[in-house]
Image (cartoon, grey):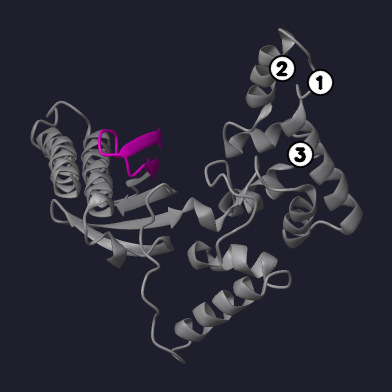
Amino acid sequence: MVAARERGIAIVAALWASAILAVIVVSVLQLVRADAGLVRGREDAAALRAIVDGAVNLTILALLSPTAGKWPVNGSPVAVPFAGYDVQVSVQDEAGKIDLNATGEPTLRQLLAGAGLDTDTARRLAESIMARRGRGRSSAAGSDVNAADRRSRSALFQSVEELQLVPGMTQALYSRLVPLVTVYSQTPWIDPAFSSPAVLAVFRGADANAEAALRRLEEERLGLRPSAASPGVVLGHAFTITAELRGSAAARVIRTAIVRLTGQPRAPLLLYRWN
């Protein structure tokens, strides 16, 4: 039974790999079939978008492969060669960020203080975030329970962008918070093994593991210790893949994809965003 299941998973993985490779082929064909009537700038941008899409698909394929453990998943950039270009790609495991829907108010206060707010302002804004997240959570009985549950779920943050709707949130503060927060980790605290230095710096005083992880990264940057092996890709986790490519003149393309590797044979990949 175990051998049969492993063969089944291998077959499904191969099918998914074929599907992703098909998308990559389409990306290459887009390069070949570029409309000659387009102005040069638009043609360059279209070509760059196709190349970046191909690099993102290659990265997803790599994350699904048995050698995925070699990929850094804490946001460190990696050069992915595709169609004669080196696309800069970073993969961030969302478990290294604070989940707006799962964390508590004290953690939000600490996060906001780390982003530069004074104690009182951080407290008020954390309360506003919790209030928005809890909107619709009211007591109910009998047939009203399901309706209350639906309101409760809809009150959760569906995207990080919804932070901009919280009273008291400024654009400058939002820009500082974006790299630190998520709605995909589904855990109340960070996993320091997957956190970026920016996240670790906020919580180093509250978590010895965050302090140790940040110290290790700083020592690696200074060449005081060899780079540690990647913690590896964990099935069930969500990942943000960011790819960037600069072409001739001012042409520049950035693609962001958010996926979850489910670990399920029939549907190993969930795609949340591609923009």
Q: Amino acid at mark 3?
A: Ile
**Of the two numbered discs 1 and 3 in the rendering, the one whose residue sits closer to the viewer:** 1
Q: Amino acid at mark 2?
A: Ala
Question: How many other residues sit within 10 Å of disc 1, few (<14), some (14-19) or many (≥20)?
Answer: few
Alpha carbon separation for disc pair 3 and 2: 20 Å
Residue segment shown in magenta? 257-275
Q: Secondary structure at mark 3?
A: helix
**Of the two numbered discs 3 and 2 in the rendering, the one whose residue sits closer to the viewer:** 2
Residue 247 visible somewhere in the drawing: no
* Relative vertical location of residue 202 with respect to residue 187 in this rendering, above or below: below
Left or right relative to 145: residue 254: left
Mark 3 — residue? 129
Alpha carbon separation for disc pair 2 and 1: 7 Å
Question: How many other residues sit within 10 Å of disc 3, few (<14), some (14-19) or many (≥20)?
Answer: many
Q: Amino acid at mark 1?
A: Ser
Where is residue 193? Give x, y as percent: 50, 67
| Magenta highlight on residue 261 | yes
Alpha carbon separation for disc pair 1 and 3: 20 Å
Label whose residue precedes the other's in the sequence (1 or 3)? 3
Q: Quadrant of residue 74?
A: bottom left
Label whose residue precedes the other's in the sequence (2 or 1)? 1
Left or right relative to 50: residue 257: right
What's the residue at 38%, 57% (across, down)? Answer: 90
Mark 1 — residue? 139
Give the residue at the far top of this rendering.
143
Where is residue 185? Give x, y as percent: 53, 47
Q: Secondary structure at mark 1?
A: loop
What's the residue at 58%, 31% (across, down)? Answer: 158
Classify the position of the N terminus by image quarter: top left
Give the residue at the far front of this rendering.
1
Q: Secondary structure at mark 2?
A: helix
